[in-house]
Image: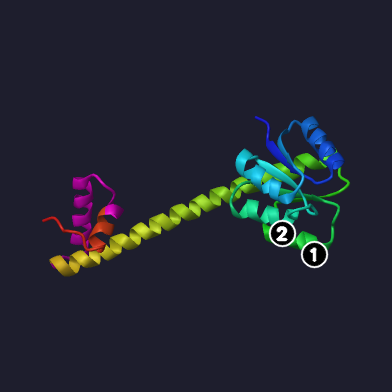
Amino acid sequence: MAVRVLVAEDEALIRMDLVELLGECGYDVVGQAADGQAAVDLTRSLRPDVVFMDVAMPRRDGLSAAEEIIADGLAPVVMVTAFGQAETVQRAAEAGVLGYLVKPFGKADLAPAIEVAVARWQQMRELAEQVSNLRERQAAREAVERAKQVLESTMGITEPEAFAWLRRAAMDRRVTLAEVAADVAAGGRLPS
């Protein structure tokens, strides 16, 4: 399946050339925008795999548009610009841009920029999911620890007995250990 690309470039001739080059390289251009705000709006609605974004555009510059697209987790962004100054590159990096092409560029420059941006984006999404899963597991462990302490003090049992009680309650209720622990820690009714 072809990578889906959104092209955001205010100069119509450059935009048409880029769309043609991308098509020749086997990419599917799903949308075109002539300003930064339109790029954000189209990215939200079309959900491309990558956005090619010019820096200098009307209504909203490409860097602020890229920052919103990336912060909202919509797509990776490759900046396409005539500006190679260190300040612009630094701003792009701070915005989270995953690729940077300086005009003029050729057909051979497109595939590496796209493939790296898409691969890095996927890695970032996977890492974010792993972090989220780890946070959930940590929260569950903390709930179990709090619940064991509640059981130890209210029922006068040992820590291993409290853990065994929580496991039995989870099995009896057919819920997770974390759910029983959260209920106990929140002061829920303790079954006998």
**Residue 179 % position (x, y):** 28, 53
Q: Is residue 80 above or below residue 91?
A: above
Residue found 17% across the figure and 58% down from its top: 189
Task: Give the farthest residue toward the bottom.
Answer: 153
**Residue 49 % position (x, y):** 65, 40
Task: Give the farthest residue toward the right.
Answer: 104
Q: Is residue 145 above or below residue 109?
A: below
**Residue 6 % position (x, y):** 71, 40
Main SS of residues in magenta = helix
Mark 1 neighbour class, 10 Å CA radius: few under 14, some 14 to 19, many 20 or more: few
Q: What residue sits right under mark 1 in the picture?
A: 87
Contact, mark 2 vs mark 1 (Cβ under 8 Å): no
How far apart are the two marked residues, 2 and 1, measured between alpha carbons? 10 Å
Q: What residue sits right under mark 2 in the picture?
A: 93
Mark 2 neighbour class, 10 Å CA radius: few under 14, some 14 to 19, many 20 or more: some
Q: Is residue 25 left or right of residue 73?
A: right
Q: Secondary structure at mark 1?
A: helix
Res. 76 visible in picture: no
Q: Earlier in the sequence, mark 2 or mark 1?
A: 1
Q: Is residue 42 above or below residue 90?
A: above
Q: Quadrant of residue 7?
A: top right
Q: Which residues are magenta?
A: 156-179
Q: Is residue 163 highlighted in magenta?
A: yes
For the C terminus, the image quarter is: bottom left
Q: Please name whichever residue, 147 or 51, is drawn nearer the observer in this view of the structure.
A: 51
Q: Is residue 22 left or right of residue 149?
A: right
Residue found 75% across the figure and 30% down from its top: 26
